[in-house]
């Protein structure tokens, strides 16, 4: 698997735009968001229904409506990320941001040919990308310059041609320009090395600092229909239109901590601003079977989301090689200007995973009369094909690129990730016009290597008020996320990575009016 990462650096257009396996996971490994009531019960909504958020899980649940309503779900999220890299703990800045749970309008109870048809028009923030991941540590094993040395060595280009060749990534071209990497003759053979490797060869260490600040998210517009007939079956479908915006400001620096001013390397800093934006489309189909007065069974499938994205990247590098070449700086825009091509603008398609969900609900009290219901217990299990995302149809600077340039990246995704199961469970107890909810959700490890830890857990609770057509719900969701971050990848040695633990909280309110 490690050798496959090498091919990621062979194709300039896609490295320039920063597509990596993590980009597919970022859009695919999302957790459901919804109304305060849905989030308070862990997000389990496949078999329960009767909520506008059913449109995003199992639209058949809309078939339980016999009235109409308007819903608004504002919220506030806050998070911080603790990390450990090469034995050194770090903490990123705490981030606060506004959240929008499922909001919109439901038009219920329309009869047609013996069926009750419900329509909903909703908007929901389905993913939140805001955060700050920071870590640092002393590395006596590898340097980030080695990734660029590998790419250039396998290009068979001269240094001059390499700097001006858009078939190399920005990072490699800037590393050549600033003398972070160079050619040396060992015996009669020419080799490419990174200057920091001289520090490592002398048993020195490099202080490495990674600082990534991200913002944006996925906001999905949704149109859904739920149908309830005279039998025990309900059916539904929805069309989702996600609007995607993601921005990352990344700085990675490396410096010699040996104090030796004559080993041809003092420091190097790489900075980039990367933006990915666009839209997509997906479909959801579902059904709910009323097995008895107390039990409901739900099944739903979400098709792969087809996204049409545009990536923009600008980068810079400053390297100080002491007496070797002093301090030199270069930007990606200067490299582009020299060749008359903007390789930092890329348009492409990406197809995200299938999602299959099954749910079971047990209702307490009268099923027919909502006012007499005493509560419920509900659970979902979800299967996500995390290995299936695929990139395709690249276009660089307005020109279509022929060939299977994304094939290596798609192969890496297939081998690097595994399909996963996610679980959600929740309960509600009603006290006349007041209710209380609690829930738990677990999202499995998407990494194929079991040594790499990645999982998400959410504990939630809330209270609700319903009286005379007005309802108000409040919820708090506490998330614990474990993930990893690779500052760079090499093919000839093991890759160092940071372990990250995120603690996040969300306060969410839903206000609604039935009519």
Image (cartoon, rainbow, N blue to C red):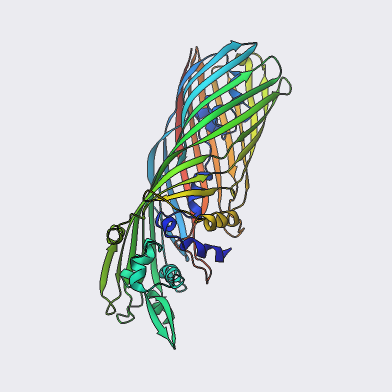
Residue drawn at point x = 47 percent, y = 63 percent: 10
Q: Where is residue 196 in the image (x, y as percent from the top left)?
A: 38, 74
Please indicate, yes or no, whether residue 51 appears anywhere in the rendered image: no
Q: Where is residue 230 in the image (x, y as percent from the top left)?
A: 69, 14
Q: How many numbered marks appear?
A: 0
Q: Is residue 113 above or below residue 180?
A: above
- Judge from the rendering whether residue 178 lies leftward or rightward of residue 21; answer left or right: left
Please indicate, yes or no, whether residue 514 appears anywhere in the rendered image: yes
Quarter of the picture holding the N terminus: bottom right
Q: Where is residue 513 in the image (x, y as percent from the top left)?
A: 46, 16
Asked where in the image residue 450 lies, by quadrant, the reply is: bottom right
Residue drawn at point x = 52 percent, y = 68 percent: 491
The extreme bottom residue here reads 187
Residue drawn at point x = 48 percent, y = 55 percent: 20
- Judge from the rendering whether residue 112 lies leftward or rightward of residue 100; answer left or right: right
The extreme right residue here reads 292
Q: Is residue 510 above or below residue 318?
A: above
- Judge from the rendering whether residue 490 lies leftward or rightward of residue 215; answer left or right: right
Asked where in the image residue 227 lies, by quadrant, the reply is: top right
Q: In terms of depth relative to the viewer, which is nearer, 8 or 100?
A: 8
Q: Where is residue 319 in the image (x, y as percent from the top left)?
A: 30, 69
Q: In this view, does 337 lie above or below 207?
A: above
């Amino acid at each position: 698997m490690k050798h496959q990462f090498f091919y990621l650096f062979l194709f300039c257009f896609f490295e320039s735009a920063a597509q990596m396996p993590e980009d597919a996971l970022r859009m695919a490994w999302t957790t459901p968001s919804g109304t305060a009531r849905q989030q308070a019960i862990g997000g389990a909504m496949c078999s329960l229904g009767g909520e506008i958020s059913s449109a995003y899980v199992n639209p058949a649940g809309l078939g339980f409506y016999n009235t109409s309503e308007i819903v608004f779900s504002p919220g506030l999220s806050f998070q911080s990320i603790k990390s450990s890299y090469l034995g050194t703990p770090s903490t990123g800045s705490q981030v606060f941001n506004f959240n929008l749970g499922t909001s919109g309008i439901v038009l219920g109870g329309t009869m047609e040919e013996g069926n009750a048809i419900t329509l909903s028009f909703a908007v929901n923030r389905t993913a939140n990308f805001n955060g700050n991941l920071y870590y640092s540590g002393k590395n006596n094993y590898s340097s980030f310059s080695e990734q660029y040395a590998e790419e250039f060595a396998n290009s068979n280009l001269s240094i001059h041609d390499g700097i001006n060749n858009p078939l190399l990534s920005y990072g490699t071209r800037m590393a050549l320009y600033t003398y972070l990497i160079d050619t040396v003759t060992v015996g009669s053979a020419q080799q490419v090395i990174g200057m920091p490797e001289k520090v490592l060869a002398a048993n020195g260490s490099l202080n490495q600092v990674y600082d990534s600040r991200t913002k944006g998210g996925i906001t999905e517009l949704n149109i859904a229909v739920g149908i309830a007939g005279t039998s025990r079956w309900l059916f539904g479908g929805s069309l989702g239109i996600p609007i995607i915006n993601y921005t990352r400001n990344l700085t990675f620096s490396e410096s010699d901590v040996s104090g030796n001013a004559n080993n041809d390397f003092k420091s190097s800093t790489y900075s980039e601003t990367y933006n990915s934006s666009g839209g997509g489309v997906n479909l959801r189909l579902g059904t709910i079977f009323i097995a008895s007065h107390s039990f409901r069974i739900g099944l739903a499938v979400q098709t792969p989301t087809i996204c049409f994205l545009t990536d923009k990247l600008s980068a810079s590098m400053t390297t100080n090689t002491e007496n070797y070449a002093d301090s030199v700086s270069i930007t990606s825009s200067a490299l582009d200007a020299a060749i008359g091509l903007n390789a930092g603008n890329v348009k492409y398609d990406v197809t995200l995973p299938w999602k299959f969900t099954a749910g079971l609900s047990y209702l307490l009290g009268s099923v027919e009369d909502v006012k007499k219901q005493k509560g419920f217990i509900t659970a979902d299990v979800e299967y996500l094909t995390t290995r299936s995302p695929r990139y395709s149809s690249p276009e660089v600077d307005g020109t279509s690129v022929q060939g299977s340039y994304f094939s290596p990246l798609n192969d890496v995704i297939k081998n690097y990730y595994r399909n996963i199961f996610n679980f959600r469970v929740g309960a509600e107890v009603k006290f006349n016009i007041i209710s209380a909810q609690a829930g738990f959700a677990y999202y499995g490890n998407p990494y194929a290597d079991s040594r790499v830890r990645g999982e998400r857990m959410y504990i939630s609770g809330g209270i609700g008020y319903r009286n005379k057509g007005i309802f108000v719900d409040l919820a708090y969701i506490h998330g614990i996320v474990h993930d990893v971050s690779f500052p760079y990848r090499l093919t000839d040695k093991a890759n160092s990575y940071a372990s990250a633990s995120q603690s996040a909280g969300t306060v969410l309110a839903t206000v609604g009016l039935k009519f």
